[in-house]
């Protein structure tokens, strides 16, 4: 049918292949020419104002009849322009952009002839200098240095170790990492994501240690993003996770430079997002979310005890309240005889079944936690403490709940805050609610059903292609030396194989009891 139609078409009106190619070339050439800088100063200024929509903070200065300076006033360092850039421009007449570039004393100076690219660089703190008669501009980066001062981490505090955290400035965060890792093999690759925000992303890894396959995989995921805006690293993590539907985080969000650098040294990949004070580390296994950076600063018996305490607290936080609901609803026989009388006396005036009673108290605890987090710091702490005491006492006196359940719910809430990762702590608190429902409907069978579902879900997960439940499944016995228990450093000379490092040895092992001369 198509061949017949092509025969009936008039050869007079039908465009040839050469005409089509010429038309495409003309169209491409027209678009290309429109993206170039005009030669005259008048057309240059009109093009700049049109491309930027002529904002009120756009500064245009005519240095000489042939030299024009343009920049966004709120994004550049005004003192550097007054004291360094303008004196350099007034020193003499420049014949070409190349001579001007070589004469400027600023550290970051480049040439460009693409209008759209140069205008975008203005929004990153660059000043454009145009010489009349040339289609190139000189780009001098004079970004303002205003940023939040470095402070101690608020969400990952520790007693022993560094007391500095990331802030919202990408350059400041990169300098913090360079202070820890003074190595030319530390690679730093930049990407721009977000059609509206044009957010800069830095991918960091140590060449020779990090897996090249994982580096390429992460690059592909970042470059394939088609986002309108990117404002925080947590949103980026959800976009490039292996499974964005899972409540469990597959990348660590950290505000500690020392923890970030430790991950890079172990073969992991790091991501910094301009404007975000939280950095990303991947791949990350489930058990690593419960390990603290301070564990490496303590003696190994103390660190191992705190890790075991932390894992026990996570179990209590997740299953203590569901076990209480299941025992009082279906399984009275598991309650010791000495506790039956206090339990019956405590619940004598409670009109609700255990499942309603537990859900009510858990919701009250979460409301107090959320209110304390959203209120100002001084007020939030007071509201959390006073509100918990007043509401708990009033609930017992009114017969809404029992004394024992208040102790259990308070202990579960307290145990959930032992998780070093804020994101994982939120997951632990949320999955407690479906487990309470399962315990109220089917007792211990419901708890086991929920446990099996969570276990299967974790086994099916991965982080950047690496198993999420490593080193326990698949079993990697060599990695057990620094998992639940932190063994002495001479035993932990191997990097975890979960990140597939190219160099597996962190250092040469020494004898446990070396002879001292």
Image (spheres, helix red, strand yellow):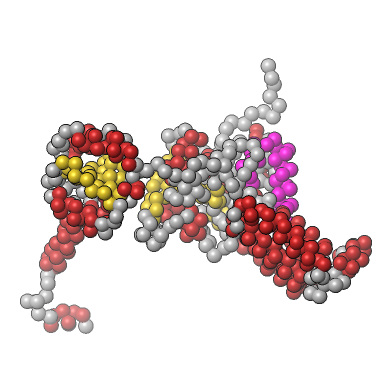
| Residue at x 54% of width, y 53% of height | 251
Left/right placement of residue 174 relative to residue 367 reads: left
Point out the residue furthest to the left here.
12
Snapshot quadrant of residue 249: bottom right
Q: Position of residue 20 (x, y in %)?
A: 15, 67
Q: Position of residue 321 (x, y in %)?
A: 76, 63
The verdict on residue 396 being magenta is no
Left/right placement of residue 434 relative to residue 199 reads: right
Snapshot quadrant of residue 227: bottom left
Q: Position of residue 148 (x, y in %)?
A: 48, 44
| Residue at x 69% of width, y 19% of height | 516
Left/right placement of residue 278 relative to residue 427 reads: left
Predominant SS of the magenta segment: helix
Snapshot quadrant of residue 305: top right
Q: Position of residue 512 (x, y in %)?
A: 69, 29
Looking at the rendering, the stretch of residues picked out in magenta corresponds to 291-318
Residue 452 appears anywhere in the view: no
Left/right placement of residue 517 relative to residue 201 reads: right
Pick whichever, 370 or 514, lies toward us: 370
| Residue at x 64% of width, y 54% of height | 379
Pick whichever, 461 or 397, lies toward us: 397
Is 277 drawn above or below residue 383 in the view shown?
above
The verdict on residue 293 being magenta is yes
């Amino acid at each position: 049918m198509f061949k017949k139609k092509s025969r009936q078409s008039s050869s007079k009106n039908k465009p040839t292949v050469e005409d089509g190619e010429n038309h495409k070339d003309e169209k491409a050439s027209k678009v290309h020419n429109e993206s170039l800088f005009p030669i005259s100063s008048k057309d240059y200024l009109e093009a700049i104002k049109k491309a930027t929509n002529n904002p009120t903070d756009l500064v245009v200065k005519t240095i000489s009849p042939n030299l024009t300076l343009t920049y966004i006033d709120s994004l550049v360092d005004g003192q550097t322009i007054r004291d360094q850039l303008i004196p350099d421009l007034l020193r003499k007449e420049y014949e070409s952009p190349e001579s001007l570039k070589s004469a400027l004393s600023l550290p970051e100076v480049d040439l460009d002839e693409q209008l759209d690219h140069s205008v975008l660089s203005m929004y990153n703190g660059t000043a454009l200098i145009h010489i009349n008669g040339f289609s190139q501009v000189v780009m001098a980066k004079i970004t303002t240095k205003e940023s939040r001062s470095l402070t101690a981490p608020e969400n990952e505090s520790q007693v022993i170790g560094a007391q500095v955290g990331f802030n919202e400035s990408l350059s400041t965060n990169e300098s913090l990492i360079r202070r820890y890792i003074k190595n030319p093999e530390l690679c730093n690759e930049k990407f721009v994501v977000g059609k509206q925000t044009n957010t800069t992303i830095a991918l960091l890894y140590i060449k020779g240690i990090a897996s090249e396959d994982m580096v390429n995989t992460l690059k592909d995921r970042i470059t394939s993003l088609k986002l309108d805006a990117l404002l925080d690293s947590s949103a980026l993590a959800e976009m490039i996770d292996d499974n964005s539907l899972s409540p469990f985080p597959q990348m660590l969000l950290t505000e500690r430079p020392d923890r970030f650098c430790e991950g890079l040294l172990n073969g992991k990949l790091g991501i910094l997002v301009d404007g975000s004070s939280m950095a990303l580390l991947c791949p990350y296994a489930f058990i690593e979310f419960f390990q603290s950076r301070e564990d490496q600063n303590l003696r190994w018996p103390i660190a191992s005890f705190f890790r075991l305490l932390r894992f026990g607290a996570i179990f209590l936080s997740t299953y203590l309240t569901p076990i209480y609901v299941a025992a009082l609803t279906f399984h009275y026989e598991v309650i010791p005889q000495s506790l039956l009388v206090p339990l019956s006396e405590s619940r004598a005036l409670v009109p609700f079944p255990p499942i309603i009673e537990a859900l009510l108290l858990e919701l009250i605890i979460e409301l107090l936690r959320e209110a304390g987090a959203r209120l100002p710091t001084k007020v939030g702490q007071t509201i959390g403490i006073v509100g918990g005491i007043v509401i708990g006492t009033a609930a017992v006196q009114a017969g809404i709940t029992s004394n024992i359940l208040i102790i259990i719910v308070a202990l579960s809430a307290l145990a959930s805050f032992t998780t070093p990762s804020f994101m994982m702590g939120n997951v632990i608190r949320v999955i407690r609610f479906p487990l309470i429902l399962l315990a109220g409907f089917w007792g211990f069978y419901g708890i086991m059903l929920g446990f099996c579902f969570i276990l299967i879900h974790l086994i099916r997960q991965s982080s950047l292609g690496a198993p999420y439940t490593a080193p326990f499944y698949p079993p990697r016995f060599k990695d057990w030396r620094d998992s639940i228990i932190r063994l002495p450093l001479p035993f932990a000379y191997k990097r975890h194989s979960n990140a597939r490092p190219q160099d597996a040895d962190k250092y040469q092992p020494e004898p446990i009891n070396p002879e001292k001369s």
